[in-house]
Image (tube, rainbow, N blue to C red):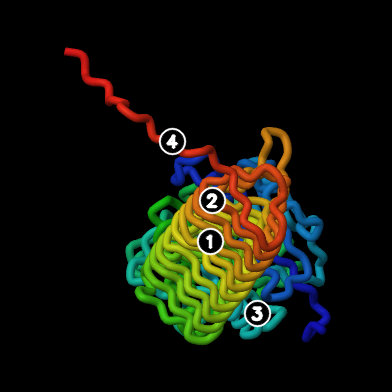
Amino acid sequence: MSESQTSLSVVILAAGKGTRMRSDIPKVLQPLAGKPLLAHVLDLTDDIHADDVVVVYGFGGDQVQAAFDSPNLKWALQAEQLGTGHAVQQAMPQIEDGDRVLVLCGDVPLLTASTLQRLLQETPTDAVGVLTVEMDDPTGYGRIIRNAAGTVDRIVEQKDANDDELLVEEINSGVFAVPAAPLRRWLTALEPKNAQGEYYLTDIVGLAVDDGINVHAVVCDDPEETMGINDRVQLAEAECAFQNRAAIALMQAGARLADPARVDIRGTVTVGRDVFIDINAVFIGDVVLGDRVQIGPNCIVQQSVIEAGTQVLANSLIESSRVGESCNIGPYARLRPGAVLERGAKVGNFVEVKKSTIGEGSKVNHLTYIGDAQIGKNVNVGAGTITCNYDGANKHLTTIGDDAFIGSGVELVAPISVGKGATIGAGTTLSKDAPDGQLTIERARQRTIDGWQRPEKNK
Ligand code: UD1
Ligand code: CA
């Protein structure tokens, strides 16, 4: 249930070319924490329960639309970038007079929902709200000009400001809350009479004041939130700021980080109690770490669940996998999509597991490839074992029963199955099923050749 009848339409300005990125990718598709800048802004619109979202696009429009293929989004083309006021005007045909319009920028990704809520709540619905912030160095931004009584009179852009105005440290974040009907009127009244020859959205402030409508400045106390991304230096600064926030959230959720400045979160990490994360861990997508999970240095965990008490040692990669309780992984292990480790399983160094289940208490400790396999409980797989799952055309399954022992250097030519409690001798190339409980071995007879001599180097 919304608090009032007014519906909230968000307009996101994303038509700018982003020249300073020096990129073939539209600016709003540049990645921050693993997803496009625009995706961060769209997430915000979800958080504040916007009724409608209109994205104003221009440069690279096809790419932008393709990246956000959602039926709930509305699009407005701004064919020529004639200024921020002109951009908002392109969205107005899709907005009703009774709506409240919130203007956001596609290149301001660090805003928080709580700041937007404040702007919306502290501004009466029939007034104009502008989110402002005090900056030590306001260069480049539009300045908020207040009258003697302290209320907002107008906004003046850097390039149009006089010396006194340039001294003002309170700047326009570019975020506005405006009632749709007068906004429509003011937008048609804009004139490009300024240093840049553009239709400035910021001029609606002066027009509102002329109409006797209150302009309400809501001051955001964190300049980081309103930071706009124009070049790759700012993109890297925003990444840093985002990662810092994410690291703080992880610690507040109960994780211990070896160094909060050396963890990267490109998605969502959910942690239990007493999780420990060593340096240079990278988390991608949705990752869940149960109680007491330990992640060693230089690990990458993507879209996976790791249950309580599991230890992941240095330099391991885990992707789209499910790891049960009290497992041991790595160092240098690679779990590829579809790997499932049941409770207490061990996957050691230089072991690759793909689309396979390693049963409870089973061990695959050294230099092994396990692909398309179902391994039962308490199985031991010796060093250098390979499931030969691919015949050049199709993938085939390997099944290994509970308590089996696979010697070192075994090749399991799938499709194949090893019975319960079976033992496979070292060096076997197993091409027929091995029965339960017996030793199966395939090995050429060993010979020693009498009197054999090593060749000598030609002189
Ligand atoms: C704008 C504001 C300035 C504010 C600053 C905050 C105006 C005139 N100035 O300046 O007061 O301090 O943002 O970051 O509004 N865009 C379009 N179409 C256009 C022009 C811009 O979609 O024709 C989009 C851009 O893609 C960007 C946003 O609007 O997402 C802001 O445009 P930008 O050119 O970066 O404005 P600034 O000069 O930074
Ligand atoms: Ca900008």
**View extreme (left): residue:** 459
Q: Which of marks 1 and 4 is in front?
A: 4
**Nearer to me, 160 or 336:** 336
Q: Marks 1 and 3, how far apart in space?
A: 57 Å
Quarter containing the C terminus: top left
Q: Which of the two discs, 1 and 3, labels the residue nearer the N terminus?
A: 3
Answer above or below: position of 304 versus 409: below
On residue 385, the disc is: 2
Q: What element carries label 3?
A: helix
Quarter-wise, where is residue 47 in the image? bottom right
Task: Tell me, yes or no, if residue 261 can be seen here.
Answer: yes
- Please give the name of the residue rendered at 44% of the width and 65% of the height, measured from the top-left corner: 281
Q: Which of the two discs, 3 and 2, labels the residue nearer the N terminus?
A: 3
Q: Marks 3 and 4, how far apart in space?
A: 86 Å
Indicate the amino acid at tag 1: Val
Indicate the amino acid at tag 2: Thr
Q: Which of marks 3 and 4 is in front?
A: 4
Quarter-wise, where is residue 341 in the image? bottom right
Q: Are marks 1 and 2 in contact (CB under 8 Å)?
A: yes
Q: Mark 4 points at which residue?
A: 447
Q: Whole-percent x and y of residue 384?
A: 49, 50
Indicate the amino acid at tag 3: Leu
Q: Whole-percent x and y of residue 136?
A: 33, 71
Q: Which of the two discs, 1 and 4, labels the residue nearer the N terminus?
A: 1
Label 4 Cα crowd, 10 Å radius (few <14 / some 14-19 / many 20+): few
Indicate the amino acid at tag 4: Arg
